[in-house]
Image: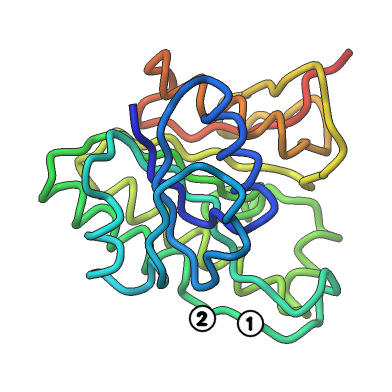
């Protein structure tokens, strides 16, 4: 199996690459700066998934797509200025779906956020306040747009809404709860997210479903 990873140079994307390679899968990635992922034995297309022709080239020979893109900022400060287009996530997802339909590829796993799309209404008030007054709002809005695009498509998507993402390694794995049910933890380690993404592709689970993820309690 070969997987196209969108957001391959990002913090979560690199964990996805590592997990997929560990299981013997091939990876295709798109990167503005291929040097950032040069140590991985993968196929790299220079450019951005925001450009359809670049994505169409990168998806050749793939069986699935995992989108870990975010509307990134200069730093983790919620008020830091953006370094990516406000619609990077949704535009890249649209490009991927178009290329997938053309190539007959069905499987798409999307990293989203708790608070995006329909989950905004039931999010804690403090989260809504911080998001609404900072540059975090652009990512939440665009994750919501991606969710709508996927739900209106004919592909086999899974939308994985995550709470706070951590770089700290977690050994318990991730747990998924149905949309509308809060996960048992307020954090999700990136390595557990990567494991979950590959698992549900392998097992064909949660097809055309939206789930909330978190670290599994010990």
**Quarter-wise, where is residue 52 in the image?**
bottom left
Residue 184: numbered disc: none
| Quadrant occupied by the C terminus | top right
Height in image: 176 above or below 89?
Answer: above
Residue that extends furthest to the bottom in the rendered view of this protein: 81
| Viewer-closest of 18 and 127 | 18
Residue 85: numbered disc: 2
At 70% from the left and 23% from the top, the residue drawn is 174
Q: Mark 2 packing: few (<14 Cα in 10 Å), some, or many (20+)? A: some
Residue 64 in the image, given as x and y percentages of width and height: 33, 36
Residue 59 in the image, given as x and y percentages of width and height: 27, 50
**Quarter-wise, where is residue 2 in the image?**
top left
Q: CA distance from mark 2 to mark 1?
A: 7 Å
Residue 197 in the image, given as x and y percentages of width and height: 53, 30
At 52% from the left and 20% from the top, the residue drawn is 23
| Quadrant occupied by the N terminus | top left
Q: Residue under circle 1?
A: 83
| Viewer-closest of 182 and 21 | 21
Give the structural element (helix, strand or loop) at label 2: loop
| Viewer-closest of 129 and 65 | 65
Q: Mark 1 packing: few (<14 Cα in 10 Å), some, or many (20+)? A: few
Height in image: 31 above or below 181?
Answer: below
């Amino acid at each position: 199996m070969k997987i196209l990873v969108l957001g391959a140079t990002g913090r979560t994307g690199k964990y996805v690459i590592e997990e997929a390679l560990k299981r013997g899968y091939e990876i295709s990635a798109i990167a503005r700066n291929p040097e950032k992922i040069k140590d991985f034995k993968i196929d790299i297309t220079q450019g951005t998934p925001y450009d359809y022709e670049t994505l169409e080239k990168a998806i050749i020979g793939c069986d699935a797509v995992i989108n870990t893109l975010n509307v990134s900022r200069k730093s983790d400060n919620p008020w830091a200025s953006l370094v990516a287009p406000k619609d990077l996530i949704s535009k890249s997802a649209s490009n991927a779906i178009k290329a997938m339909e053309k190539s007959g590829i069905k499987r798409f796993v999307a990293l989203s956020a708790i608070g995006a799309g329909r989950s905004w209404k039931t999010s804690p008030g403090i989260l809504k306040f911080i998001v609404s007054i900072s540059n975090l709002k652009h990512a939440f809005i665009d994750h919501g747009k991606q969710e709508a695009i996927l739900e209106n498509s004919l592909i086999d998507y899974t939308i994985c809404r995550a709470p706070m993402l951590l770089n700290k390694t977690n050994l318990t794995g991730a747990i998924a709860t149905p949309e509308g049910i809060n996960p048992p933890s307020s954090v999700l380690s990136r390595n557990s997210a990567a494991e979950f993404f590959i698992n549900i592709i392998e097992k064909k689970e949660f097809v055309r479903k939206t789930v909330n993820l978190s670290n599994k309690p010990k």
